[in-house]
Image (cartoon, grey):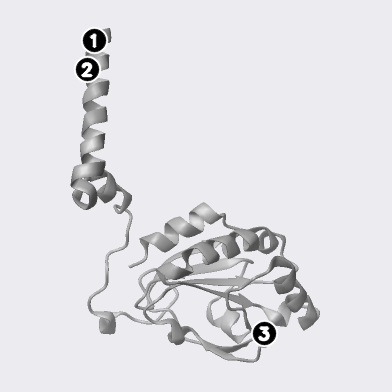
């Protein structure tokens, strides 16, 4: 019995090495890692706009902390993590450092973070500026001063995040705080 287990172990090790070295891109291990990837949408014109998975994300236009105009449609061709947050929100405060780390490590892969601050819920705009400075946030922070975009996206809890593929289609939604591994996993699934 011990010999059988040893032989099976050696056989599995050899198969693993062959898969990783000789088969590389065609190997089972590589394909298993891509198993959860969303299928690419070919006919984007047939997709309706809405907030459900598989809908085209509604476009919006806001101003960021530097006074620059930011539109969701500016990021077509990129994988977008669209996050709605407030500086007084504890789960928002907890996820922001991990969001920033992921962004710095993954922006070369075409990842974009639009962290829409619900400025209409803030006591002062200076709180948002201080938050961004304190956490060293380098991704784009548009300000929803009138609450129009958070209303359009039906935001009921903070933070809420939409994962949008390179064609502008919502692929998943998360309500509540997230950790880096969850964010990266969702972003890697996006075509």
Q: Nearer the viewer, residue 155 or 109?
A: 109
**Would you call the spot at circle 1 few (<14 residues within 10 Å), some (14-19), or many (20 or more)?**
few
Q: Position of residue 50 (x, y in %)?
A: 42, 79
Secondary structure under tag 3 reads loop
**Label 2 – label 3 distance at C-alpha:** 63 Å
Answer with the quarter of the image where residue 180 lies.
bottom right
Q: Is residue 55 above or below residue 27?
A: below
Rendered location of residue 26, percent (x, y): 19, 50
Q: Please, what secondary structure does the residue beneath circle 1 have?
A: helix
In the image as oriented, which residue stretches furthest toward the top?
Answer: 1
Closer-to-camera residue (68/156) = 68
Local SS, label 2: helix
Mark number, residue 7? 2
Looking at the rendering, in which quadrant would you find the C terminus? Answer: bottom left
Contact, mark 1 vs mark 2 (Cβ under 8 Å)? yes
First reached walking from the N terminus: tag 1 or tag 3 = 1
Q: Earlier in the sequence, mark 2 or mark 3?
A: 2
- The quarter holding residue 2 reads top left
Describe residue 86's horizontal placement relative to residue 107 as left or right. Answer: right
Residue picked out by circle 1? 3
**Residue under numbered circle 3:** 65
């Amino acid at each position: 019995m011990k010999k059988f287990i040893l032989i099976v172990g050696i056989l599995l090790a050899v198969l693993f090495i062959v898969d990783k070295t000789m088969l590389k891109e065609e190997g089972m291990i590589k394909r298993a890692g891509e198993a959860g990837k969303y299928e690419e949408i070919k006919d984007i014109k047939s997709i309706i706009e809405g907030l459900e998975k598989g809908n085209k994300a509604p476009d919006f236009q806001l101003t960021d902390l530097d006074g620059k105009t930011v539109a969701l449609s500016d990021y077509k061709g990129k994988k977008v993590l669209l996050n709605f947050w407030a500086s007084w929100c504890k789960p928002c405060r907890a996820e922001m450092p991990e969001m920033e780390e992921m962004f710095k490590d993954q922006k070369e892969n075409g990842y974009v973070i639009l962290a829409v601050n619900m400025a209409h819920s803030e006591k002062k705009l200076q709180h948002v500026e201080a938050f961004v400075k304190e956490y060293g946030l380098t991704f784009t922070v548009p300000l929803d001063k009138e609450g129009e975009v958070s209303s359009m996206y039906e935001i009921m809890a903070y933070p809420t995040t939409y994962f949008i593929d390179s064609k502008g289609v919502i692929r998943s939604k998360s309500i509540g705080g997230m950790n880096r591994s969850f964010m990266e996993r969702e972003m890697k699934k996006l075509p």
